Image (tube, helix red, strand yellow):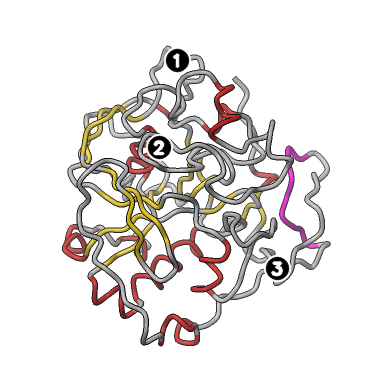
């Protein structure tokens, strides 16, 4: 199976997004898809405003509850003044990757048995532009819409968002920590107890109901949560935008693993999951994975959060600010 070349879809961090929407997406000569911008457009990314200048940093009316453990898979709670809803993903065991005899199997999806020893709260939807704007003071998105997922965001910017949210005084007082999901957490949450290629089954036609992809997106992102959710209440795990994960990119462990977090050294790229509005259904499968450099910017990439509580910090739960 031929794999889509993503290099031409990347926009270097020195170009970025803009303070206003850029020109229509276009395909560069020899390219395979749209780009958010290029040096000819002058579409330059704004810098996030200083942390202390955002309204949330000094909002005395802002309180938050502790992200304590949930009771049932898919239980929904709302944390932070950004009104971010999270779904509970209980501890458990699953087979990560794709069987070698599956038609869509790729070499980087070699299956491995994974145990997640602790449950976690996964954001119910992709982070929206409105939520990102409130904490970062800018909107890097190419496709504009208050309730659309933030797009054209780098891994560095996504982890800075996590750091800022964790540093807000009410969140620190509540003991809440926010970060990107690990690859294992992301796939586990996407599958929601299902072993099929997508969260709903093995037929790619189901993407019409569960995700925005190249056949139904109209070449743009869409407001989050408009398609069907998976068994644990998570929306847009397939399509809309692909989502940054915490891990460095590398081969899966050769033996069963508990709470895997990717390699410690080697490849400098960070992983992403979930396909996107531009891609075919195969690249939105639960097991599909790829990687880019943390400063790379792409019109089809955003992120969602994981919330944990501070006792986990000593076990490395809040590693999103580390460079390793």
- In front of the other: 130 or 3: 130
What residue did someone put label 3 on? 18
Callout 2 environment at 10 Å: few (<14), some (14 to 19), or many (20+)?
many
Q: Is residue 35 left or right of residue 118?
A: right
Labels 3 and 1 touching (C-beta < 8 A): no
> At x 54% / y 59%, what residue is drawn?
128
* Magenta stretch prevailing secondary structure: loop
Which element is circle 1 on?
Answer: loop
Q: Say which of 188 and 4 sits in front.
A: 188
Q: Are marks 3 and 2 in contact (CB under 8 Å)?
A: no
Q: Is 89 colored magenta in this rendering?
A: no
Q: CA distance from mark 1 to mark 2?
A: 19 Å
Percent position of residue 216, x then y: 68, 34
The Cα atoms of the two marked residues, 3 and 1, are separated by 42 Å
Q: In terms of sequence position, does the residue under pointer 1 or pointer 2 come before the other?
A: 1
Say which label, 3 or 1, has the lower sequence index: 3
Measured as percent of width and height from the top left, residue 3 is found at 61, 28
Establish if 129 lies above or below 190. Answer: below
Q: Which residue is mark 2?
A: 190
Image point (82%, 63%), residue name: 41
The span picked out in magenta is 31-39
Q: Residue 102 — which label? A: 1
Find numbered disc 3 in the image and state the secondary structure of the residue it sits on.
loop
* Label 1 CA crowd tier, 10 Å (few <14, some 14–19, many 20+): few
Q: Quick check: 281 left or right of 40? A: left
Using the image, determine if residue 84 lies above or below residue 121.
below
Q: Position of residue 179 (x, y in %)?
A: 36, 59
Question: Splitting the image into 4 quarters, where does residue 169 fall?
Answer: bottom left
| Numbered label attached to residue 39 | none
Check the picture and name the quadrant holding the C terminus: bottom left
């Amino acid at each position: 199976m031929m794999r889509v070349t993503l290099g031409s879809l990347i926009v270097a961090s020195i170009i970025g997004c803009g303070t206003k929407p850029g020109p229509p997406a276009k395909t560069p000569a020899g390219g395979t898809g749209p780009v958010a911008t290029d040096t000819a457009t002058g579409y330059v990314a704004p810098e996030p405003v200083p942390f202390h200048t955002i309204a949330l940093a000094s909002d005395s009316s802002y309180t938050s509850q502790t992200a304590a453990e949930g009771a049932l898979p898919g239980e929904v709670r709302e944390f932070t003044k950004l009104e971010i809803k999270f779904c509970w993903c209980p501890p458990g065991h699953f087979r990560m990757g794709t069987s070698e005899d599956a038609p869509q199997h790729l070499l980087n999806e070699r299956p491995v048995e994974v145990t997640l020893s602790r449950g976690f709260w996964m954001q119910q939807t992709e982070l929206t532009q409105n939520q990102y704007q409130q904490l970062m003071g800018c909107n890097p998105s190419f496709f504009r819409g208050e309730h659309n997922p933030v797009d054209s965001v780098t891994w560095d910017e996504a982890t800075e968002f996590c750091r800022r949210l964790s540093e807000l005084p009410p969140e620190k007082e509540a003991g809440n920590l926010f970060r990107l999901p690990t690859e294992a957490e992301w796939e586990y949450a996407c599958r929601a107890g299902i072993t099929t290629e997508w969260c709903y089954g093995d037929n790619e036609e189901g993407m019409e109901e569960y995700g925005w992809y190249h056949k139904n997106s109209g070449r743009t992102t869409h407001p989050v949560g408009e398609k069907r959710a998976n068994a644990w209440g998570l929306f847009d795990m397939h399509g809309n935008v692909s989502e940054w994960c915490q891990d460095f990119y590398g081969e899966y462990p050769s033996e069963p693993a508990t709470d895997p977090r990717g390699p410690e050294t080697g490849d400098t790229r960070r992983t992403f999951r979930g396909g996107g509005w531009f891609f075919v259904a195969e690249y939105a499968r639960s097991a599909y994975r790829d990687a880019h450099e943390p400063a790379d910017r792409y019109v089809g990439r955003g992120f969602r959060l994981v919330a944990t509580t501070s006792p986990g910090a000593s076990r490395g739960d809040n590693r999103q600010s580390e460079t390793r």
